[in-house]
Amino acid sequence: MNRANPVVLTGRNLTLEQLINVSRCGAPVKLSAEAVGQINRASALIENWVAGNRIVYGVTTGFGDLATVKVDAARTRLLQENLIRSHAVGVGEPLPVDVVRAVMLLRLNGLLCGHSGITLETLSQLVNFLNLDITPMVPEQGSVGASGDLCPLSHIAAAMLGEGDVFHQGRRMTALEAMKLTGLKPVSLHPKEGLALNNGTAALTGLGALALYDALKLEKNADIVGALSLEALHGVPYAFDARTHALRPHSGQIAVAQNIRRLIEGSEIIDKYKGSRVQDAYSLRCMPQVHGASRDALDYVKSKIEIEMNSVTDNPLIFPDDETALSGGNFHGQPIALAMDFFAIAVSEFGSISERRSARMVDKSLSNGLPPFLINDSGVNSGFMITQYTQAAVASENKTLAHPACVDSIPTSANQEDHVSMGYWASLKAARVLRNVEKILGIEAMAACQGVGFSLPLSLGRGTKAAYEAFRAQIPFLEKDRFIHPFMTQSIDFVRSGALIEAVESAIGELN
């Protein structure tokens, strides 16, 4: 792990880049002095309420439909630990380590604002888990996105109690074993702390934030790979003229058109064939409109994720100035559920149009002179025939995954929670859509570079040339059929890594 500079948390200004540094690069975290003061003030108030037998939901009462059951002061700590034990009931494969680290960071950040009543002692366990590389094993299924992400967050809290499994230094082990190796001890929860730890939207937001970060890279890759396909198919440049896009000034559309113009600038291939027709098929001609609309959707998602990353989403909320506890619904994941449903639709469209460009390249009746299936001596050789099948299969999977999750609310907790967001599933499947589109674009990149090879030695544009040369340094032109799977996998990984973007931006400057 890269031990980068510490990320100082305040609860109010965590950025997407900082989240990536902590979740994927191992940057340590520190609590600001202001946050520590806020934490101590609110937790002291909780202790006073318990001592005074004040009735506060989730502190001196049961939870959900059991909110009418009063719990005496002597058992308020047991109440919190039982909450965690009973709610840690996830199923399925473990979430990836980077996802769980993002979730822990967001839960920690949301608790720092002093409206949750958690103690500094308990929060320090989360800080230590992040800084000492202890990642709870969290099954991927079990949250309905209200009352927050109860199930996955309970698995994290259970590990803090010394229960369940964790990942440490690349190995799965019990939480107690990891604590012994690092000198930590299990925490004992104070009143309100179990509810503070497991009540909130950190899991659905953490999943969404990581997917968003990768999608912002994918949108550049889509423009680069699409421009390579434009070159391979001897496309014409007229649809990218700035005058057209000024008349319909959606920001994403304008940005993509400018990217395409810069990528193909100076192309001898485009110049040679630009007189052959006045327009191309939609999958080429409408890249600014389609890619651009998806970019605009991702901008909306980004605005919602950034708000949620710095919000307080548990319940009840403590207001120390007024010495008040208010039950509300900030745990409801609807704002991110809608955003991540939109994300899945928008990202799926990058894959849908990519598959259509690939389909043109392998079809001799649509490929503007390319050999059938992008291979010499086709017949004996099948070339790229079946790579497009794979794209079609994955693109079709995305059509199902793009069905909105948030419209499928299902009641829980004896109908006390009678409308839930399903935001966790929205984020989980959105991440799967993203991974699928990375595969589709990687396959298109391989096909497009194969197609470009038949136009050489004519020069490509400045940007597409840089992309092509970077790609060819890794993956060869296929003269005849070979075991293609390793090349396809390598192409997907190469595009996903951001290497194409780096090569292009080194040549022509930063893309939109």
Image (spheres, rainbow, N blue to C red):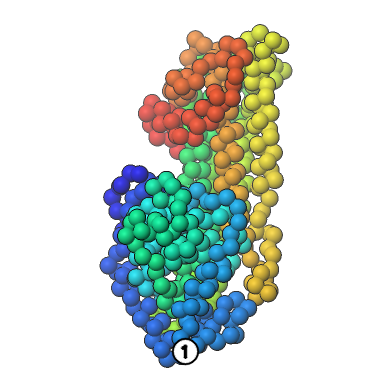
Residue 424, placed above or below residue 493: below
Q: In which quarter of the image is residue 280?
A: top right
- Give x and y (percent) for residue 150: 55, 65
Rendered location of residue 251, percent (x, y) = 51, 44
Q: Which residue is drawn at 66% across and 53% down?
A: 404
Quadrant of the image occupied by residue 309: bottom left
**Side of 266 relative to 366 (left or right):** left
> In terms of secondary structure, where does tag 1 sit?
loop
Front one among 453 and 474: 474
The quadrant in which the C terminus is found is top left
Q: Which residue is drawn at 46% across and 90% down?
A: 53
Q: Where is residue 473 in the image (x, y as percent from the top left)?
A: 44, 19
Vertical arrangement, residue 12 with respect to residue 232, above or below: below
Task: Give residue 480's position: percent from left, percent from top.
Answer: 60, 11
Residue 24 seen in render: yes
Q: Which residue is drawn at 37% across and 52% down?
A: 133
Q: Quadrant of the N terminus?
A: top left
Counting other residues with Cα less than 10 Å from the Cα at mark 1, is it few (<14), some (14-19), or many (20 or more)? Answer: few
Residue identifier under label 1 = 54
Task: Please state if 479 lies on the left or on the right of 501 as rendered.
Answer: right
What amino acid is at disc 1?
Arg
